[in-house]
Amino acid sequence: MGDLKISPLAPKVSPQLPALNGVRMATAQAGIKYKDRTDLLVMVFDQPTSVAGVFTKSKCSSAPVDWCRKALAGGKPARALVVNAGNANAFTGARGDEATAITAKAMADACGCAEGEVYLASTGVIGEPLDADQFAPLLSGLVADSKGDCWQQAAEAIMTTDTYPKLATSTFDLAGRSVTISGIAKGSGMIAPDMATMLSFVVTDAAIESDVLQSLLSELVEGTFNSITVDSDTSTSDTLMMFATGAAGNGPVEGDALGAFKERLREVLHELSMQIVRDGEGATKEVEVCVKGAENDGAAKRIALSIANSPLVKTAVAGEDANWGRVVMAVGKAGEAADRDNLAVWFGDIRVAVAGERDPDYSEDAASEIMRRDEIKITADVGIGSGEARVWTCDLTKEYVAINGDYRS
């Protein structure tokens, strides 16, 4: 697979993330799959750190996902994170488990912590054994060289078919202290998260307990990472983890303070998830799908995902074709209650269909102008209830086929 052009939807300016007290990072070129680029990231936490995580619901989850679930269940704080790109260490059998054990032991030895305090993530090709012995000797040097102002390099090291690094941050006052939430993510294809996204790691210097972090993360993922889709495929490796170093020394996070933290965390997760949509493999357009008038919110989301995942809808968007009939098709196939004669569809602010037929004021020129935009909103009012949902996706282009047809080359 050759060099990928940067997505036309990429942010014009990459945010500058400040160093966070309590966490240090380092990256390396381990040669796992890629040449002449970094593919290994470590995060080191100076003190035992609160940790939470959500992971793929895939029944073929990767060895690192299984490792992290077990580590979280153990209830220990986090002291380190190791992430590699280029090899997912998924569907690798006993050798996959051996690779995680080798990595965790090497990192634990380097940090002077327990192996159960080391968290792992891998992304890349499925089914290829990961040679942990190839990069385990690098970990002690990376720990020694780690530093706080390394967010950009960290985001770059975990990329696979991503065309740009994904970063987000927010600084605000919390319980008497200034705190920061910063995060990175990777993801471009195989994106239809089911509990998390491809890989995302969020760190705050706020003092907050693991059980509170877990509750917030499990709730907020639903309207952020679980509301995006590129190609309807859920990865074996989906991992979203959050760490709280406590170095800010704030007071108790409860009541209004908890609400403020939750809202800022939601903003960071939303921004990271939207960057993934805008970097969908081959994407040229960002699409927001809004469904209202459904039987309930769950039904609305399932209808929205039916629209967002439809290859026919997505290719119509790519071709700038105001083909509202494909939206009607996707509503009808979703398996949720709908009434053809109550259905209305909008592209942007142009209503193109109403009461079960084309809008009497429909203008092909006006609708086509909407479709030429980089950001497009599709709205469907099912007309039978009060359920609402929003999801985000991108168009489906020839470049997506080219990238994935050549992925292992």
Image (spheres, helix red, strand yellow):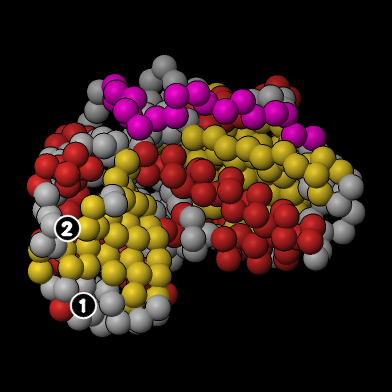
Tell me the residue at 62%/45% (across/down): 202
Q: Which image quadrant is residue 47 in?
A: top right
Q: Position of residue 3 (x, y in %)?
A: 29, 22
Residue at the top extreme, as displayed: 36
Q: CA distance from mark 1 to mark 2?
A: 14 Å
Residue beneath the point at 79% across and 38% down: 22
Q: Relative to the observer, which residue lies in front, 31 or 362? A: 362
- Whether residue 289 is visible, yes or no, is yes
The residue stretch that appears in magenta: 3-21
Residue 400 percent coordinates (x, y): 21, 39
Task: Give the amino acid at mark 2.
Answer: Val
For the point 43% across and 33% down, which residue is it? 159
Report whether 25 appears left or right of 271.
right
Residue lying at 27% horizontally and 74% vertically, measured from the top left? 382
> Element under label 2?
strand
Secondary structure beneath label 1: helix
Residue under label 1, please give it: 342
Locate the N terminus and report the quarter of the image it occupies: top left
Which of 399/172 is in front?
172
Residue 117, x across and y down, in percent = 71, 51
Q: Main secondary structure of the magenta part?
A: loop
Residue behind mark 2 = 352
